[in-house]
Image (spheres, grey):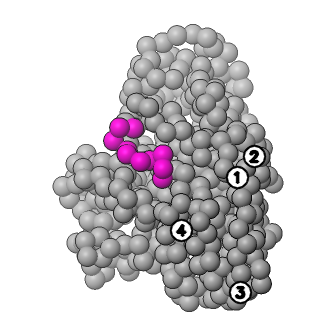
Amino acid sequence: MRHILAGLVLSSALVARAWDGQPTHIYGVNLGSWLVLEPWMLPQEWLDMGGQSCADDCWTCIATESSFAKAYPDTVDTTFAQHWDTWFTQDNVNTLKAAGINTVRVPLGYWIVEALVDRSHESYPRGGLKYLRRGLGWLKDAGIQAILDHHALPGVQTPGQMFTGNCTSDVQFYTPYNYHRALVWTAVMTALSHLDPDFGSVFAIEAINEPIMNATQTPNYGTFQRNFVQVIRAVELTLGISAPSSSLSLSVPLSVSNNFTAALSATSSATIFPVEVRAALSEAVPILLAIGVASGLQTIFEASPFKRSRTSLVTNFMDVNWQYDNPSNPADVAIGPQAYDNHLYYSFGGVAAADPTSYLISICNLSRIQADAAVGDSPLWFGEWGLSTEFNATNEFLYKWADAQKLAYSKGAGWIYWNFKTEISPLTNGSALARQWSYLEGLKLGFLTQDPAAFHDPNVCVPYMNSTTNSTSS
């Protein structure tokens, strides 16, 4: 069979609409602490598993998946399988669907692709891909779309954070070796998103969760952004899925058999792609073959006709304004549908003075969507937010706080709450943690509306518009 690589568009033109066939607005939740576990969200379960609590110094004890795997090499896989099996369930999917949730963001570690882990010095639990496939299948059946979020990158992208899977100050992601591993991960996830029926709900892949904000500490991140987009589009072109064109279109004919992995091998030699992209595609082939054998997908990967029914995936980045000091702009590397992510938490300080009025003035006059659009980072969704505060918030305030944030974020492409749930136990002071961090608990308490598009008071922001407050960021 002759396969044509056509329609590679090297353009920085703004994509007016990021995706076709998706809801006008995203109303979503994160599936945090499922496949990337953060002990602060489930402290009692973590201790029961064998983990430890070390307050804010998460590098001093067993407080991440990496440290756990090193401490319990013989039992880590079994212990985590129990967690994966129970933290996110079919019942959760049913509840989210009934609540009108149309999107989930799925935080993933690079170790979900087990072949990328260097076992000489890296330790993580094995077996997560099975549970990811099962969970995505549930979501597909429920009609809930999914974003695959590369939440924990090889080498660690941000220091001192549980969400990286390895709490450390030794940040090594921004190196050629680890950029390469992230690109291989991207190629594998793109192929699965188009070929594995369980991945049918996936519409976007996010390149990296919360890189270091200081752009001087993320060398060559712009090059990684370009390569990330081209890896996804190269896999799609191999499948006969062309990104929408706008200016420059390149095509290279390749003679390959009716075999996806053989076609991808051929694509990896196409000189229209940078060397780094071709190397990632080449390395993804044997990994996909192994996954095919383990998951019963051999006929799809090796011998079935190409699947051309899917449209292009949305490439997703943290917005350019996430960083400072001359960051690269991901809008400059867009090829086809692309969207942008911003996260906003007031509880960590630095956004507004710690009082209810200042919070409401700040959120009601939020300018991040306009600031991003001015530099091409549109459409924008808010991929993480919550009801947490720096002060003891009353129930009355939390009704307003939920409404005001939803109003602000809905001016863009929508919002995705962090998190779908948290533990309720004596270690979380009952529901105190869940009250402001769990979407499901927020629904029960009434702060969040059963219809996510609705508001208790759609005029909540009227008294605060065009006001000023003691804030350091908008």
Spatial CA distance of label 3 from label 1 is 25 Å
The residue segment tinted magenta is 215-224
Query: Which residue shows up at 70% across the image and 76% down it?
Result: 254
Q: Is residue 182 visible?
A: yes
- According to the image, label 2 marks what residue? 247
The residue identified by callout 4 is 278
CA distance separating discs 2 and 4 = 23 Å
Tell me residue 245's x, y (percent).
77, 51
**Distance from the alpha carbon under mark 3 to that under mark 2:** 31 Å
Q: Nearer the viewer, residue 167 or 220?
A: 220
Q: Earlier in the sequence, mark 3 or mark 2?
A: 2
Q: Height in image: 370 above or below 246?
A: above
Q: Are marks 4 and 3 in contact (CB under 8 Å)?
A: no
Q: Earlier in the sequence, mark 4 or mark 3?
A: 3
Q: Quadrant of residue 192?
A: bottom right
Q: Position of residue 458 (x, y in %)?
A: 72, 26
What residue lies at 55% left-to-right and 51% top-to-bottom? 226
The residue labelled by disc 3 is: 257
Query: What residue is drawn where x is 48% and y is 12%?
Result: 469
Q: Is residue 122 left or right of residue 90?
A: left
Q: Of the two numbered discs 3 and 1 on the same chain, state the one appearing first in sequence.
A: 1
Crowding near pointer 4: few (<14 within 10 Å), some, many (20+)? many
Residue 364 is labelled as none
Question: Secondary structure under badge 3?
Answer: loop
Vertically, is 312 above or below 336?
below
Q: Which residue is mark 1?
A: 9
Cα gap from disc 1 to disc 2, whole angstroms: 7 Å
Amino acid at pointer 4: Arg
Figure check: 445 above or below 171: above
